[in-house]
Amino acid sequence: MASPPLVRFHSVSKRFGSHTAVDALSLEIGRGEFFSLLGPSGCGKTTTLRLLAGLEVPDAGEILIDGKPVQGLPPWERPLSMVFQSYALFPHMSVAENVAFGLEQRKRPKGEIADRVQKALVQVRLAPETFAARAPAQLSGGQRQRVALARALVVEPTILLLDEPLGALDLQLRKEMQLELRALNRELGITFVYVTHDQEEALTLSDRIAVMDQAKVAQVGTPAEIYEGPRTEFVARFVGEVNILEVKGKKVAIRPEWMDLFRPGEVPSGESSLEGTVQSVVYLGETLHVHVAIDGGETLKVALRNEGQLTNPITWKRGDRAAVAWRPDDIQELAP
Amino acid sequence: MNSRSGWRFTLPGLAWLLLWGGVPLLIVVAYSLMERSIYGGVERGFTLDAYAQLLDPLYLGIIARTLLLSLIATLGCLLIGFPMAYVIARSGRWRRWLLLLVVLPFWTSFLVRTYAMIFLLRDTGLINSTLMSLGIIDAPLDLLYTPGAVLAGLIYGFLPFAILPIYASLEKLDPTLLEAAEMLGARPATRFWRVTLPLAMPGVVAGGLLVLIPALGSFLTPDLLGGAKTTLLGNLIQNQFTTGRDWPFGAAASVLLLVGTFIALVWHLKRSDAEGESA
Amino acid sequence: MTRRLPWPLVGGVTIAFVLLHLPVLVLVAFSFNASRYSLAWSGFTLDWYRVLGERPAILQGLRASLVIGLVATLIATLLGTLLAIGLYRLGTGKLRRNLEAALYFPVVTPEIVAGISILALFALLRVPLGTTTVIIAHVTFCLPFVTIVVLARAAGMDRSLEEAAMLLGAPPAQVFWRVTVPQLLPGIVAGALLAFTLSFDDFMITFFTAGPGSTTLPLVVYGMVRKAVEPTINAISTIILIVTMVAVAGSEWVRRER
């Protein structure tokens, strides 16, 4: 990180009754970053976001924004804004009134508010003439999401918090919105803190990802670091497909695409291999997954690039003997 | 499910309601336009005398007093009932018990509850006895048989009717809306005035009507708590059908009450329909 | 986030709750007070309850209330349940919605108007006032409540059970008696108990439709209250309260059981 981190968590803990939602969590988020909190349900990612927002108060630890401790401060005294999972648009207010709400709380003059609301709607690609007077109930899911975004951006926050904002959208719309969010992050220079359970989404959008598991951070890194260099079995399994093997008493992870298939005995020198029998071949479009039952144990998944099954086919089929091979450098050692 | 055979089931019940509920109302309307009979009851002959009688200042005064007291009672119930509904909606574990406490008087005999008020307010009642034994007053206060007693009785009697619809509205309120408002900089007071209250409005209006309508037609409360000084529309009507023996007049006053009720209901239905469309 | 409610608010609301129940609690408490005239507590006694048994008017009132209550409840429950099932079978069209809305009219009509209007009808038909007229009037205002309760139960009913029965070959009558009615039963019983409560407690409508032999308990109490305040009124009021609460509690319990 070039400049000092914008957000810092120092050993923050939060309990709800007997359940520990966040356990001595520490992390740093840089200025302008698109930072994702990734993990399964219940891992603590949303609680972490809410602690940063000021909607929850930590039981222990410090949260610093721009070097200043904020854990006692209410949300409106922090330089941030939030987009909720359910959008939380005020049903009794129009789109324009919703977007204007934050500016009204900041006592901005009417003219300025009207102007900024217009600009915000345009920014999220909702034509003001059409949408400003509409009620949230008259909008589609995607449109409501944009209004929620406009409402959060119009107050020009330093940090934008997003709690699984794209979950309710269909695939096509989701992918569109992902690109738009990324573009906004780059254009506006606002730090995005993004909560999601969708690992593909996290890899697509983020500058860095914190993978969380059971109230703790399992690993923080760039998408490449997380995907190609998982440090624990949990991270290896949660992000992408993976084969877990025991090599020399240690657990290692090998991504299916780092493996290759050869006829037994044809494995190039320098590569490690295990022999087994092909169980199934699954056609996935871009790749083919070949499941090979290794002699003496597990089933490994090998991903082979599809060069065109109709013209240049891969001919592995069930029952073939094969050797699954990989370069020794490509394995990832996992923490015990 | 079969809608052809099913609807026949409605016939007995509807027929009963029409005969014993609908027809009587038509009779009342008819009677209000007929002549008064010296034997009590009505005589043939179309006349608007009964309605003309309503315009007598004495009776206009009663109508005005009824309207005024009912509106004040409604306001009182809403002002007291809203905080109660609010606390219940936010009470978590105790919600069921608190609701039970609100609903309990709801189903208790109105007569018994009105009598309980008498017991409390009379010269030798609990309030006066306590104040006298504490030395705060020397002689008992005239609490009973005043407009104040009637007002207290109306509020006490109808408060649960106000609380329940308001509670229902507040319960449906999405808490993330308040969090979103908080994130955007709204302080607690602002959150209440700009988010909670507007969204609870349907419940407030429903609660208000559930108090206003019965209050306008109340008889027992002014009869037992108000005495001769506080005659309301309900007492007036009752009187015409008992000692007064002026059925057309009583019918006319009833029609007035019915029209008021009807207007309030239709207004409410139109209003909630309009809201339903935009939701 | 569970925000604490400001304590003045909670305090004020608590006081409101207490005041809401205070009058009745006082009434009940003093039904056991040995002193007849003063409010000073002079000992616990059941005398005022015992005395009730010696007053023929009160015993007759109780009998009338129970008889009228039971008969009116039976009829109102029968008609109300049929009406509810009919409405439910009408689906969700305009007719259904309008009928349901019309159902609320008897509920909100001021009782005094309901009372005098039915009195007028009885007068027109030259029907002498008596137990029958009271029962008819009670059925009329209890019926909508039964319908509302049963309809609510029907709305929560699992339609697929009826459909499954039909697919298994059961004719409509069988489906009705062996699938629909058992499912509705908690609602029907709850509605019946509610109807009984309303009938037992009613004053206004009974006032106008009762004849000399059909003075119900509330009418007796009214007469007593107008004459003089005495502890026996407290006693009989307490009894009315208990009957009502047992019925309502039963109604709620049945509603929740399934």
Image (cartoon, helix red, strand yellow):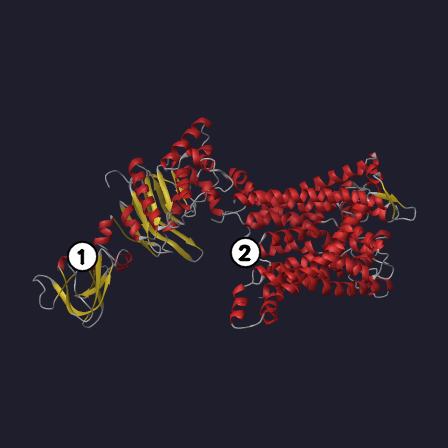
Query: What secondary structure is marked by label 2?
Result: helix
Amino acid of disc 1: Gly
Of residues C258 and C24, the one drawn nearer to the viewer in this rendering = C258
In x, y percent, where is residue A267?
10, 64
Amino acid of disc 2: Arg
Residue at image position (9%, 68%) is A265
Q: Residues within 10 Å of mark 1 (few under 14, many from 20)?
A: few
In x, y percent, where is residue C189?
66, 65
The count of marks equals 2
In x, y percent, where is residue A218?
29, 54
The furthest residue to the right: B38
Query: Gap between marks 2 and 1, in whole Å?
Result: 63 Å
Could you say which quadrant of the image residue B270 lies in?
Answer: top right
Mark whose residue sits in front, 2 or 1: 1
Q: Which mark is residue A252?
A: none
The chain letter under disc 1 is A
Could you say which quadrant of the image residue C148 lies in?
Answer: bottom right
Residue behind mark 1: A308
Q: Residues within 10 Å of mark 2 (few under 14, many from 20)?
A: few
Residue A17 appears in the picture as rendered: yes
Of residues A230 and C92, the one drawn nearer to the viewer in this rendering = C92
The chain letter under disc 2 is B
The furthest residue to the left: A269
Q: Are marks 2 and 1 on the same chain?
A: no
Query: What secondary structure is marked by label 1?
Result: loop
Residue behind mark 2: B93
